[in-house]
Image (spheres, rainbow, N blue to C red):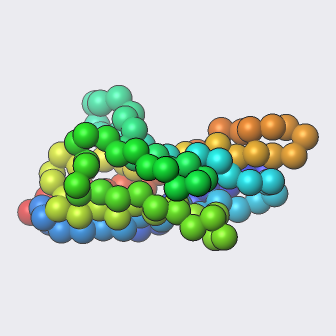
């Protein structure tokens, strides 16, 4: 079984920074794409940033220039560096990974979510 454990959420003032981490553990062959999503109260879940195993990145327009996704394949970990935070970034942030599991194939895995609150 694969588990994704997120950390790094919390409170920040507008203009501040936070760094989220998401570490995968369990038995698997490899992790393909890793993605950060977020869901604000009363809104649908939206993609924030994604990164392939090879390092190709994609960021949502709303966070371009402020957030940066990265990963460490040796540690099976994905990061989200969030700078210049705005109140509208307040949401629960979820980590997603497409994980290759032997005898099963690619399995979609989600973290439990971590709250990010931006306010003064």
Residue 82 horizontal/vertical position (percent): 29, 61
Please tell me how many numbered marks the rendered image carries: 0
Residue 97 horizontal/vertical position (percent): 60, 47
The residue sitting at 28% across, 30% down in the picture is: 42
Residue 9 in sight here: no
The residue sitting at 55% across, 49% down in the picture is: 52
Quarter of the image for the C terminus: give it. Answer: bottom left
Give the vertical position of 106 relative to 64 (above or below). above
Residue 24 in sight here: yes
Q: Is residue 95 left or right of residue 62?
A: right
Q: Nearer the viewer, residue 115 or 47?
A: 47
The residue sitting at 72% across, 39% down in the picture is: 107
> Which residue appears farthest toward the right when viewing the image?
103
Q: Is residue 97 left or right of residue 100?
A: left
Give the vertical position of 95 relative to 15 (above or below). above
Give residue 13's quadrant in the image. bottom left
Q: Nearer the viewer, residue 74 or 17?
A: 74
Q: Is residue 77 left or right of residue 19?
A: right
The residue sitting at 35% across, 29% down in the picture is: 44
Residue 56 horizontal/vertical position (percent): 49, 50
Give the vertical position of 29 relative to 42 (above or below). below
Q: Is residue 20 left or right of residue 86?
A: right
> Which residue appears farthest toward the left when viewing the image?
120
Residue 95 horizontal/vertical position (percent): 51, 50
């Amino acid at each position: 079984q694969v588990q994704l454990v997120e950390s790094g959420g919390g409170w920040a003032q507008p203009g501040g920074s936070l760094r989220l981490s998401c570490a995968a553990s369990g038995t698997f062959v490899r992790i393909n794409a890793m993605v950060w999503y977020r869901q604000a109260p009363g809104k649908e879940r939206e993609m924030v940033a994604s990164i392939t195993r090879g390092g190709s990145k994609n960021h949502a327009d709303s966070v371009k220039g402020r957030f940066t996704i990265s990963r460490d394949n040796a540690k099976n970990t994905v990061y989200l560096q969030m700078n210049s935070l705005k109140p509208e970034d307040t949401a629960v942030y979820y980590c997603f990974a497409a994980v290759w599991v032997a005898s099963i194939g690619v399995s979609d895995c989600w973290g439990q979510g971590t709250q990010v609150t931006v306010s003064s």
